[in-house]
Image: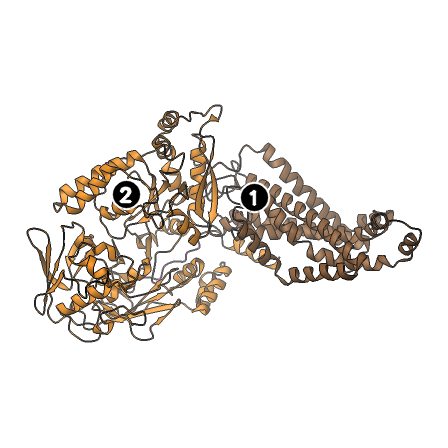
Amino acid sequence: MRAATLMLAAGLVACGNPFPAPIGSAHPDDAIPRRGGTLHRGTFADVRSLDPAVASDDLAAEVIENIFAGLVDYDASAHIVPDLAERFDVSPDGLVYRFYLRQGTRFHDGSELTAADVKRSIERALHPSTPNPSSSLYDTIDGYAAFAAGKADHLTGIAVEGRYVVAIRLRETDARFLSVLALHSLRPVCASGGDRYSDAWEPCGAGPFKLVHGAWDRGLRLRLDRHDGYFRPGLPYLDAIEWTLSMNRAGELYAFQDGNLDLTHDFGDTDLQTLRADARWSPFLSPEPDRTIDGEVMNTEIPPFDNVEVRRAVAAAINREHYRAYKPESLSPATQVIPPGVPGYDPHFVGQSYDYDAALLHMRNAGFPYDPRTKTGGYPGVIPYYLVRQGATEYTAQILAQDLAKVGLRLELHLVNWPTFLSLVYTRGTVAMSAPGWNTDYPDPSNLFESLFSSRAIAGEQSTNSAFYRNARVDELIESARHELDPARRMALFGEANRIVCDDAPWAFTDTRRFVDVTQPYVRGFAPHPVWTFDTASTWLDRPTSAKRSTLALLWSRPRSLPTLLAATHARRAW
Amino acid sequence: MIDPATSQRLRKDRAALGGFALVVLLVLFAAAVPLVSAHDPWTSDFVVGVGPAGGPVSPGRAYWLGTDRIFRDELVRLAYGARLSLFIAIGATALSSLVGAAVGIASGYFGGKTDFVLMRFVDVGLAFPFLLLVMAIGAALGQTTPTTIFVVLGLTGWLGPSRVVRAKTLQVRNADFVVASRALGQTTGRILLDHVLPNVAGPITVLATLSVAQMIVAESVLSYLGAGVSPPTPTWGHMLFEGQEYVLVAPWTLLSPALAILLSVIAFNLVGEGLRNALDAGQIGRR
């Protein structure tokens, strides 16, 4: 009863705009970046490993990008540019990639980066004893099969051609090779990393920031300090970046309001809507590119979705604006396979859209006519729909069920926990319908088509093609695109695959999803990065350290929000 | 069962009368609102149900209690939630009282090995925290419906009452009128029905009324934690969960289910307390 009274009090006093005025910029007119300061980043997530060879979670990518530099990297427009390599060239047959390293580049341990380090790091990452979840992305490197099977001591495709020159030979042309090389897996590691993976190793690379011993308090905090020997002179501007890990949403919100955090992208839509409507805050909201595609996945091997007309009916029955209404800040209606943040997205192509009459027609063609006036007919069975308990799909699934009921398809929601969901959805013959979504691993359409719609991705378990969809023409297009080195012709192949998949509707594409970065005004030069969350090289603080308000000051400035204060005090104690 | 003195005591107890009135209001609310409302609890209204800032619309003429996060009528969902809460709470209480009374009477009256076995079983059951036990069973069942929740709550809630009934039965067993009946050759069944049951009925009634309040809370907690009835079925606990993220921008989504739970728990507790005082049932149900 006491808890209920407290809640009541919280609700009554907290009405209205909960955000105080932002802590202002100290030198708003200063255009020249200042050096120094620690950027505080809050996140609900945690990091399991910071070894580029094995890390797979989203937050790890953001941290690893700061510790490890690669031969090539994605720039602010998601184009591939040389990084540790000064330049690179590709042989006319498209099989040999030759990288010329910058001379004098220093690892965090002070040693110089050489071609031998590059070869050692690649072999370390792809060695069969390394639990690397993305090693198959590199299967076109010559000698990969023998090396991955443990039949060879070295990868024959990697050749050291001088102290600063390394060549990678492929066994066949692979148009996405540079895209996957720019990922973290093969990035050079210090000599201390050895030539085999070990989970006891302390991460050490050649990136702009280094991890000092003791600066990672697992599950709680992670701090990176500036690498003074970084190869780009004068960068980075920040002294350090500090992540507060595993925060709960309310704690993160209050810590940000309190000025204890400088950057976050975990705010919910309600908070984002409030900030957007507040002219003091709206300039400091930066949406990241939409790289996640969401859709209702229909298992093409399970009735009624083995019938293409039922799938088309679903694709036409969903009003995407209803999904957007639920989360207007982070969802946009989707009409095709490729989200706007990935090359190959065609803003003029509408492959799927809401068309109620067409949906009824497809149901009739499928043999399940439905009469909306009498509400009779439709598919006679009940379709089990699996979703994660208390996740965002809990709401979109209820919206979906309303839309599908209008064309005679009845859903029964089965709520399960996250591990159960993962094991069910990717197992063959188990789930008729679900919405697992797909966050693209690298900005290239091959990642979407190869993982989700290629028959090669079908497996008994852990099948990323969770619709168990197969179409010979789509397979052919995906294979051709893999070997097509001309970018325009390659995109045309994906364009055709996009049209076929939208028409076959193994997925009813519903929305694309994005995070929205929120920064304090004194965080300058900030831009969301199209692949790595944010760009630290250009970020600087125009206060020497982030301004922190005392609990007393907080009380003074916002006497009406007592619960805010209580939670803020609690959050601080938790640190 | 209710003699004139008891009913007179009840009539003088203002708190208990207030509790009765609240319970009647609650039942009326649950029964009537869905019948007269223009909205249904399952359908979103993406036109009138959306507020100017894009969130749920605030309480007003179109929606008396506003809308929830996917723009459904909060009032009619609250009423359906009341039906569900009352069905589960009263059903589970009936079931747990029945089982509790049967076990308690058997244990107290027959004593010996029966008593030992039954009471050790009760001890083991009571050693588990109630909600943990309920959640574990709920999780094991997977898909949960209102019926499974009421069965789970009913079959786990009888342990405490069985103890109380056993104690009362022990008192009654050796009372003169029971000994006399036995001497006159009445069957055990008759003795239990005619003499034991009427004497333990008071405590059972008090316990049952108080238990309704506990069951409402238990059902809400289960739904709040996501182990209760699956959406889109509205439940107070789940509405509370849905509303918490919106507390700053749409406080009604949190306040309405919170107040509903608060008031109904108070109501049943007041009635229970009143009955206890009126039936002169002493310490039963006190914690």
Estimate the x, y position of residue A284 in percent, counting from the top left: 31, 55
Q: Nearer the viewer, residue B154 or A286?
A: B154
Which residue is denoted by mark 2 in the rendering?
A: A455
Q: Nearer the viewer, residue A228 or A369?
A: A369
Name the amino acid, label 2: Ser
Chain letter of disc 1? B
Whether residue A400 is situated above or below residue B193 in the rendered picture: above
Q: Residue at x 84, y 60 (%)?
A: B171
**SS at badge 1:** loop
Q: How many marks?
A: 2
Quick one: quadrant of the C terminus of chain A? bottom left
The answer, for residue B53, to whether it is visible in the render is: no
Residue A22 belongs to the span the image colors magenta: yes
Estimate the x, y position of residue A50 in percent, counting from the top left: 30, 66
Q: Relative to A551, is A146 on the left or the right? A: left
The orange-coloured chain is labelled: A
Which residue is denoted by mark 1 in the rendering?
A: B145
The answer, for residue B197, to whether it is visible in the render is: yes
Stretch of the chain drawn in magenta: A17-26
Q: Nearer the viewer, residue A393 or B27?
A: A393
